[in-house]
Image (cartoon, rainbow, N blue to C red):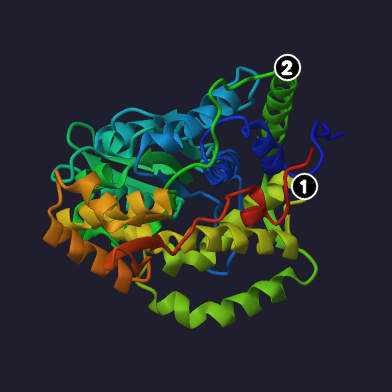
């Protein structure tokens, strides 16, 4: 007899409820919850794609400029409070140290099972990599080419994978599955990944969750008894999700729904140069598997799961162009970002006020070029007010006003009370 869950409805919704008293943006907590489920499902579940099995593993990176968004805190809550709880069953192997090819391979070898009498390895080599700062994990870009190549290769969860080490010769790993959850700033990411590599194999597999600010403010965060009770239930139910094994199947109409979505987006997916967008077709299915597992035990992908997955990924894509620009920006790009952030926070401001804010790092001529760039990009609107003493006063207004981020934006419903 199966053990019932303690929480009704979506585990993700309850996780969002648990974290709503903390200042990290809700979308960060959403993707941390997806990552936790993905790591617990590991390689034990899959979706048959004909020529290969698709596993729900993901490389997720929380990306933001400042400490305001508390990227690392969002990750630590999931890792320490939920997955790290002593009552969490059968935890996946955790890897949080500075990564080197040798250290990562040794961890995978340690997790590889011993062949049985028929020389078949049944244990999975599942590793959950988490990092409060991705650049610390990866190291400097002039020394991490081999590591990035390995992580790129491991993304596809091979049945067998071999690597030649310096001291032990060839090492073989079986039944691979790697998940990554990490945080970083655009500047530190540029320190770890060269500009030429942006859009390449490794970054193509990263899901960047970019947020410019958070609308949450809690001077004195509280953790009342009812929130602790919810945490205990989250740990219990995630342990049950960890037990899932076997193939996913399609619910009524879901296979046709996905085919229609795929055909409607096929040209865009093939031609898009934007990082993971070309892998969006598989990412949708990976997220759908996690969304399904969050709510039900039957390993069935329903239309509702697909709709939520598409909604979640589309929400990430809205800010993907900004994320890419920040990652690959030059000094001019950094200055442009700084000016845009000032205008965004003020919503509307005069040119003279803006110049007073940046004169020590950006002169008047350069500021004019930056504002022109932002205007032509459709990010700010420039207006002239001639009512003051017959002189023209320029005002800049931020056009891309951020919508309030709530679970409604990417789950299709609000957290349950």
Q: Which of marks 2 and 1 is nearer the N terminus?
A: 2
Q: Residue 98, located in which quarter of the rendered image?
A: top left
Front residue of 191 and 389? 389
User: Between marks 2 and 1, how big is the CA–CA gap?
Assistant: 27 Å
Which residue is rendered at x = 25% and y = 35% of the image? 100
Q: In the shown orientation, is residue 405 left or right of residue 365?
A: right
For the residue labelled by badge 2, is the local secondary structure a helix, a strand or a loop? helix
Q: In the shown orientation, is residue 165 left or right of residue 53?
A: left
Quick one: quadrant of the C terminus? top right
For the residue labelled by badge 1, is the local secondary structure a helix, a strand or a loop? loop
Q: Residue 46, located in which quarter of the rendered image?
A: bottom right
> In the orientation shown, which residue stands out farthest toward the front?
389
Q: In the shown orientation, is residue 4 left or right of residue 337?
A: right
Of circles 2 and 1, which is in front?
2
Mark 2 Cα within 10 Å, few/some/many (few <14, many 20+)?
A: few
Q: Which mark is residue 264?
A: none
In the depicted structure, whether residue 4 falls above or below residue 49: above
Q: Residue 196, located in which quarter of the rendered image?
A: bottom left
Is any atom of residue 25 visible in this view?
yes
Is any atom of residue 243 visible in this view?
no
Quick one: quadrant of the N terminus? top right
Q: Where is residue 179 in the image (x, y as percent from the top left)?
A: 46, 43
> In the orientation shown, which residue stands out farthest toward the right?
1
Q: Position of residue 272 (x, y in %)?
A: 39, 74
Reading the image, the residue beneath label 2 is: 225
Front residue of 348 and 47? 348
Which residue is rendered at x = 62% and y = 30% of the image? 21
In the depicted structure, whether residue 331 falls above or below residue 96: below
Q: Position of residue 38 (x, y in %)?
A: 57, 44
Reading the image, the residue beneath label 1 is: 296
Mark 1 Cα within 10 Å, few/some/many (few <14, many 20+)?
A: some
In the depicted structure, whether residue 221 falls above or below residue 49: above
């Amino acid at each position: 007899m199966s053990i019932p869950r303690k929480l009704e409805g979506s585990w993700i919704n309850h996780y969002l409820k648990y974290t709503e008293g903390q200042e990290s943006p809700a979308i960060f907590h959403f993707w941390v919850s997806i990552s936790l489920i993905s790591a617990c499902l590991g390689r034990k579940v899959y979706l048959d794609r004909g020529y290969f099995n698709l596993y729900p593993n993901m490389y997720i990176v929380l990306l933001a400029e400042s400490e305001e968004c508390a990227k690392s805190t969002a990750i630590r809550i999931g890792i320490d409070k939920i997955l790290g709880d002593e009552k969490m069953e059968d935890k996946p192997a955790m890897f949080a140290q500075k990564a080197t090819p040798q250290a990562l391979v040794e961890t995978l070898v340690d997790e590889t099972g011993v062949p049985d009498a028929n020389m078949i390895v049944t244990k999975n080599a599942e590793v959950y990599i988490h990092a409060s700062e991705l650049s610390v994990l990866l190291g400097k870009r002039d020394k991490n080419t081999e590591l990035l190549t390995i992580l790129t290769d491991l993304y596809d969860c091979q049945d067998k994978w071999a690597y030649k080490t310096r001291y032990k010769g060839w090492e073989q790993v079986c039944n691979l599955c790697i998940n990554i959850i990490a945080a970083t700033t655009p500047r530190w990411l540029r320190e770890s990944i060269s500009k030429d590599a942006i859009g390449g194999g490794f970054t193509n597999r990263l899901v960047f969750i970019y947020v410019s600010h958070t609308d949450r403010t809690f001077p004195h965060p509280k953790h009342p008894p009812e929130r602790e009770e919810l945490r205990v239930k989250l740990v219990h139910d995630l342990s049950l999700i960890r037990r899932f094994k076997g193939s996913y199947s399609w619910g009524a109409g879901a296979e046709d729904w996905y085919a229609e979505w795929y055909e409607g987006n096929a040209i865009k997916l093939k031609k898009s140069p934007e990082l993971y967008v070309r892998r969006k077709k598989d990412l949708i299915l990976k997220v759908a598997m996690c969304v399904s597992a969050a709510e039900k035990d039957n390993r069935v992908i329903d239309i509702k799961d697909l709709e939520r997955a598409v909604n979640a990924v589309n929400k990430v894509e809205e800010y993907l162009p900004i994320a890419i620009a920040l990652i690959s920006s030059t000094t001019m790009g950094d200055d442009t970002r700084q000016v845009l952030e000032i205008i965004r926070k003020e919503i509307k401001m005069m040119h003279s006020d803006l110049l007073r804010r940046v004169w020590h790092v950006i002169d008047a001529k350069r500021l004019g070029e930056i504002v022109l760039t932002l205007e032509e990009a459709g990010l700010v609107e420039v207006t002239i007010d001639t009512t003051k003493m017959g002189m023209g006063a320029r005002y800049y207004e931020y056009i891309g006003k951020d919508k309030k981020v709530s679970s409604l934006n990417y789950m299709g419903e609000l957290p349950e009370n």
